[in-house]
Image (cartoon, rainbow, N blue to C red):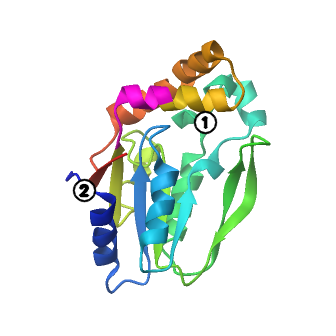
């Protein structure tokens, strides 16, 4: 699991894409690790048509989580439709135009067919917490990516970022800390402790 810079990772992705009509890059990391930021930076830095596909559109809706007693754990592995996400990743292998669901954070709900990948996109940067999780059904993703990347962030940094995220949503310092520690950091520990090795690691 070599440690690389973003510039080195760009070169590795372009090398991986040689002779292929489309490649899938899995970018995994715990909440607050900067997955979407790095994925967007890579998409802009590549000399090939690229797009970012986030995992967030596969959140189970609140109406499904409430009867399961999982609303307060939203964002945990069991609160996503992992099988549907794996099915999307398999479909994305085809170099056709494909729609996929997104997540509206303001409305706190998924948006069916909220975005699309065009047929001419050569590199898909698929980002999410649990892409390398060694736990069924997430383990179905093993082998579906051409190249995998893990973001390495100190746990204390994750904690600070997640508290700040909730502070930016208007929570008090105490409530933001409770929210981060009660759910987000629990999910982060799952990623940190139960993930498979990646092809490359990037410090974020």
Q: Residue at x 52, y 36 (%)?
A: 77
The x and y percentages for residue 99 are 67, 69
Mark 1 = which residue? 79
The x and y percentages for residue 117 are 60, 73
- The secondary structure that most of the magenta stretch takes on is helix
In screen coordinates, is 168 left or right of 18? right
What SS does tag 1 mark? helix
Residue 4 badge? 2
Q: Give the extent of the magenta segment.
A: 152-160
Q: Are marks 1 and 2 in contact (CB under 8 Å)?
A: no
In screen coordinates, is 14 left or right of 188? left
Mark 1–mark 2 Cα distance, whole angstroms, equals: 32 Å
Quarter residue 106 falls in: top right
The x and y percentages for residue 68 are 68, 26
The x and y percentages for residue 107 are 80, 42
Compared to residue 39, the image places residue 158 above or below, namely above
**Magenta-span inclusion, residue 133:** no
Q: Residue at x 37, y 83 (%)?
A: 20
Compared to residue 179, the image places residue 54 above or below, namely below
In screen coordinates, is 145 left or right of 102? left
Quarter residue 105 falls in: top right
């Amino acid at each position: 699991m070599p440690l690389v810079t973003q510039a080195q990772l760009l070169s590795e992705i372009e090398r991986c894409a040689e002779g292929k009509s489309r490649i899938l890059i899995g970018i995994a990391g715990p909440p607050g690790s900067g997955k979407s930021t790095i994925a967007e930076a890579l998409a802009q830095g590549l000399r090939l048509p690229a797009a970012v596909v986030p995992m967030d559109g596969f959140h189970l809706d609140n109406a499904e989580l409430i009867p399961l007693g999982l609303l307060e754990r939203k964002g945990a592995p069991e609160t996503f439709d992992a099988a549907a996400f794996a099915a999307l990743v398999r479909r994305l292998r085809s170099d056709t135009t494909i729609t996929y669901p997104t997540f509206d954070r303001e409305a706190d709900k998924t948006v069916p067919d909220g975005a699309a990948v065009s047929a001419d996109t050569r590199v898909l940067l698929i980002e999410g917490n649990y892409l390398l999780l060694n736990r069924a059904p997430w383990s179905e993703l093993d082998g579906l990516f051409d190249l995998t990347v893990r973001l390495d962030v100190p746990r204390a940094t994750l904690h600070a970022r997640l508290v700040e995220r909730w502070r930016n949503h208007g929570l008090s310092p105490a409530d933001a800390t409770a929210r981060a520690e009660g759910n987000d950091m629990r999910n982060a520990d799952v990623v940190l402790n139960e993930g498979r090795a990646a092809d490359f690691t990037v410090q974020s």
